[in-house]
Amino acid sequence: MKKRTFSGIVHLFAAAVFMLTLFTGCSKDDGKTLYLFNWTYYTPDSVIKQFEEEFGVKVKVDSYASNEEMYAKLKAGATGYDIVIPSQDYVSIMIKEGMLKEIDHTKLTNKGNISNLVLAKATYDPEMRYSVPYFMGAAGIAVNKDKVSNYSRNWSIFADQKLNQRMSMLDDMREVLGDALISLGYSVNTTNDSELSAAVELINKSWKPNLVKFDAEGFGKSFASGDFWVVQGYAEAVFGEVPESDWGKIDFFIPEEGGPMYIDSMCILKNSKHPDLAMEFINFIHRPEIYAQFLDQFGFPAGVNPSAAQYMQKKAHYSVEELANCEIKEDLAENLAKYSTLWEQIRFEE
């Protein structure tokens, strides 16, 4: 569903300038249309429809596949959007750059449904001054139990030589480096050169030789086809490709030692023309019975809004408790280039 990969801001900025000519949805403002800029397929159509019917409005949705794409388009001058849903590092960036409007807590009557756990993890905005958590999750490991037995339920599974050329990890530097850092007892946000070097050595010497490839696009399909027996990835991408009748053959888990995690949050852009309607939408999402529809769509746990659990019709693919030792990926600022250089070494050096 979502790609969380690093790509060149320069190239995305150029593409965003071109895309500006395609955005015409806000050319005529009737005051009854909310413009949502969101990850692809991240808000169920049923939820959009219910909001439209209850409030007598329309919701127009533009989508993006990465935080970088979203940010580049906004920085290139795209206007008209009311709500955007960035991940934690980009929330931090956008707060610092004055791109977000403060949340009106008098209109956030459902804020009591938002868990203390997610607010404790949201160190970039723990009081929800500029952002309201939408979902908190993490990539994990999916194992085909028909093909694999007697395996370690932690990141060391990728060092298992008997699984050579039957595994993949995400093509995502923060995820893979973060897994290695956590395995070594370090923070996923470290900028310490010796710690990062140790993580690179672990990946290159122990994990990479056993991988078919780094894959952020097709790992779910490859797992479903039986080509890959073990994959690092997002639960919704794996279970979305496997027939529900075969879900019992999947062991999906987030290692006990934790790993990198993300918090996507609803934010109102500073230049929003419909901030009151935007607040209605954010508050609507956190009605437990509405939020449960979102969770059921993707098999997510109710970590952000625990009250929604009682309304869920489907079992989540992993538990909230598995996120306890996970650490959010923070904005690395100028140190992002350091990570990018190390990732290029991992990806392309023999």
Image (cartoon, helix red, strand yellow):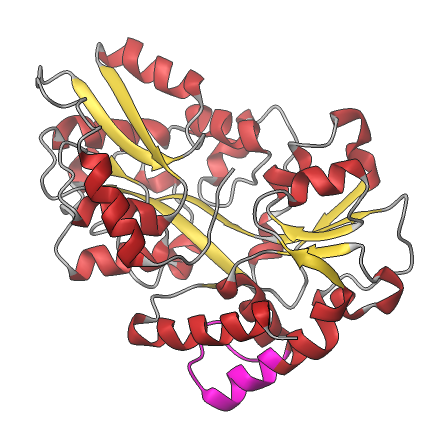
Image: 191 above or below 246? below
Where is residue 311? Give x, y as percent: 54, 25
Q: Nearer the viewer, residue 44 or 286?
A: 44
**Residue plotted at (60% across, 74% down):** 349
Image: 5 above or below 47? below
**Residue plotted at (29% across, 45% down):** 70
Q: Quadrant of residue 246?
A: top right
Farthest residue to the bottom: give it: 194
What are the residue bounds of the magenta stretch?
Answer: 184-200
Q: Is residue 35 left or right of residue 117?
A: left
Q: Is residue 194 left or right of residue 74?
A: right
Image: 190 above or below 268? below
Question: How many numbered marks does the figure carry?
Answer: 0
Q: Quadrant of residue 346?
A: bottom right
Asked whether 190 falls inside the magenta stretch, the response is yes
Where is residue 255? Give x, y as percent: 68, 61
Q: Nearer the viewer, residue 289 or 67?
A: 67
Quarter of the C terminus within the rendering = bottom right
Image: 104 above or below 276? below
**Residue plotted at (19% across, 57% down):** 95
Q: Can residue 282 be seen at all in this image of the molecule?
A: yes
Q: Can residue 317 be seen at all in this image of the molecule?
A: no
Q: Quadrant of residue 53?
A: top left
**Residue plotted at (83% across, 62% down):** 164
Where is residue 81? Give x, y as percent: 19, 33
Asked whether 334 falls inside the magenta stretch, the response is no
